[in-house]
Image (spheres, helix red, strand yellow):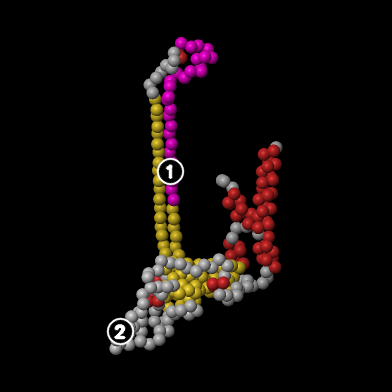
Amino acid sequence: MSSKLNRVILTTALLTTAALTSGCSAINRLSAIGEKPALTSIDNPTTQPGYKPVQMPMPVPEAASYNANSLWRNGSRAFFKDQRAHQVGDILTVTVNFTDKANIANETQRSRANKEDTGLTDFAGSKLLTGAAASVFPGRLLTADSTSSSDGKGTVQRQENLQTSVAAVVTQLLPNGNLVVEGKQEIRVNFEVRELVVAGIVRPEDIQSDNTIDSSKIAQARIAYGGRGQLTDVQQPRYGQQVLDVLLPF
């Protein structure tokens, strides 16, 4: 009876914790019934909570050198002003072109059998004993048998295809001239908002003449594509089911 009571108390506590955790979110969702999901305001990425400047290994800075009777300076990219992004606050277009497909199948089989036998059939004259005393001493000493086997299989089939463009802002200029960029795009269609976030480090040399860069040339790239709204809510399991999926061992 006590074990059943303990399980009831534990279940009640877990459900209460889940309800308190999701209480604010549930209230906000209830207040937004029938309303379109609101777009977030345009803010400075460097002022967002959790923002941290990027720190990467940098080479020793070199002083600019000038050649006599020459209009060219070492490190320059053109005689005329370059219109491509090169300083904090500049905007460039990131072309996201991500296509990936993977099929992986693995199978592992393992088996092992062990047997230990000392060959001693009589321990301390145990055969001379009778009655209850005979069952105290083993007839064979240090004899053990064990067998184990396992068979594991796994299959992965994945395919992604994302092709789009998003404007990004230069948020930081690294000492070696590389640019830290971050861009966010939100599109609302009826009651669903689609979000695209791109961030990473780019070289000025990789920026094309039309001020665009391919996502494959972004180092430490972080690309996120998702959404929020009524359709996303329907596709997500309920809070109680998510809690049980985490806690239940079977």
Q: Does 153 appear above or below 221? A: above
Q: Position of residue 61 (x, y in %)?
A: 38, 73
Q: Which mark is residue 67?
A: 2
Span of residues in magenta: 128-154
Q: Position of residue 217 (x, y in %)?
A: 40, 71
**Structural crowding at the residue carrying mark 1, measured as other residues with C-alpha within 10 Å and reported as few (<14), some (14–19) or many (≥20):** few
**Structural crowding at the residue carrying mark 2, measured as other residues with C-alpha within 10 Å and reported as few (<14), some (14–19) or many (≥20):** few
Q: Amino acid at mark 2?
A: Asn
Disc 1 + disc 2, Cβ < 8 Å? no
Answer yes or no: is residue 168 visible.
no
Asked whether 42 or 38 is in front, the reply is: 42
Tell whether 228 sits left or right of 167: right
Tell whether 137 sits left or right of 207: right
Asked whether 6 or 59 is in front, the reply is: 59
Q: Which mark is residue 151?
A: 1
**SS under mark 1:** strand
Q: Amino acid at mark 1?
A: Asp
The tag earlier along the polypeptide, 1 or 2, is 2
Query: Residue 96 lies in what quarter of the image?
Result: bottom left
Q: Position of residue 107 (x, y in %)?
A: 40, 48
Q: Does 86 appear above or below 248? A: below
Q: Which mark is residue 89?
A: none
The residue drawn where x is 70% and y is 41% is 5
> Does the segment drawn in magenta span residue 56?
no
Query: Residue 22 lies in what quarter of the image?
Result: bottom right
The nearer-to-camera label among 1 and 2 is 2
Q: Does 128 appear above or below 144? A: above
Q: CA distance from mark 1 to mark 2?
A: 71 Å
The residue drawn where x is 53% and y is 12% is 131
- Total residue callouts: 2
The residue drawn where x is 40% and y is 86% is 81
